[in-house]
Amino acid sequence: GKANYGVYLVIQQGILWQAFPAYLFGLYTKVKAKSILFGLIMGVLSDLILIILNLTGNDPFVAIDPPLAKLDKAWFALVGVTLNLISIGITKIFIRNNCCSDTADEPSNNKNHYNETAQESASVIDKKFNPRFDGRLTLDKIEDIMSGIDEPLTKYKGIFVYLCCICCRRGR
């Protein structure tokens, strides 16, 4: 089938929606990176499969129920992110049970293995010039690093951003 702006928008939204669980779980929870990565892969793959089926005209959902041809294809993005979240949940359960984690066959007396490995792998330059660095980035550390930094829109009530807009309009 012929692709139009709506199809491209659905493709873009489908892929962008996959970042939502990564930000949510990566910053605000202790979900392992493997779970998030697996969910991301599953979500993007499902989006790509649905999009390819739609663009080639071989949409199996329309073959099953012809009125689905009139349905907006934005549901592709929701299917992808739902599969992403389900995959994260399933993988988190398996990793919690140590059936597929990195430390499954290591001695259980080393509970801080992740932190020690992260600290050892940090470069000497990071440790020397950034005393706040200890191997794991958390929301508190991001807020600490960003304290005292002004965003362009909040610095001087955004006057420089608005001046740029005004100057660009006058240049036309």
Image: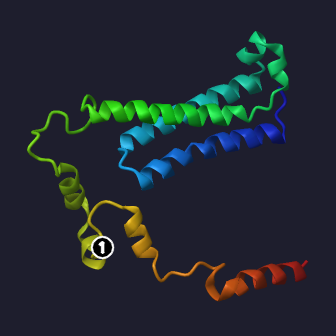
Q: Residue at x 70, y 39 (%)?
A: 11
Q: As drawn, is 105 to the left or to the right of 133?
A: left
Q: Residue furthest bottom?
A: 156
Q: Residue at x 26, y 66 (%)?
A: 134
Q: Residue at x 32, y 30 (%)?
A: 94
Render colour scheme: rainbow
User: Which residue occupies the foreground of this view, 171 or 63?
Assistant: 63
Regarding mark 1 in the picture, which secondary structure is present there?
loop
User: Which residue occupies the foreground of this view, 90 or 40?
Assistant: 90
Residue 41 visible, this orientation: no
Vertical comparison of 61 with 141: above or below: above
Vertical comparison of 56 with 159: above or below: above
Three-letter code, disc 1: Arg
Percent coordinates x, y for residue 151 in the rendering: 59, 78
User: Which residue occupies the foreground of this view, 146 or 46?
Assistant: 146
Q: How crowded is mark 1: few (under 14 residues within 10 Å), some or many (20 or more)?
A: few
Percent coordinates x, y for residue 132 in the rendering: 30, 73
Would you name the residue on which mark 1 appears?
132
Q: Which residue is drawn at 75% across and 43% down?
A: 9
Vertical comparison of 63 with 160: above or below: above
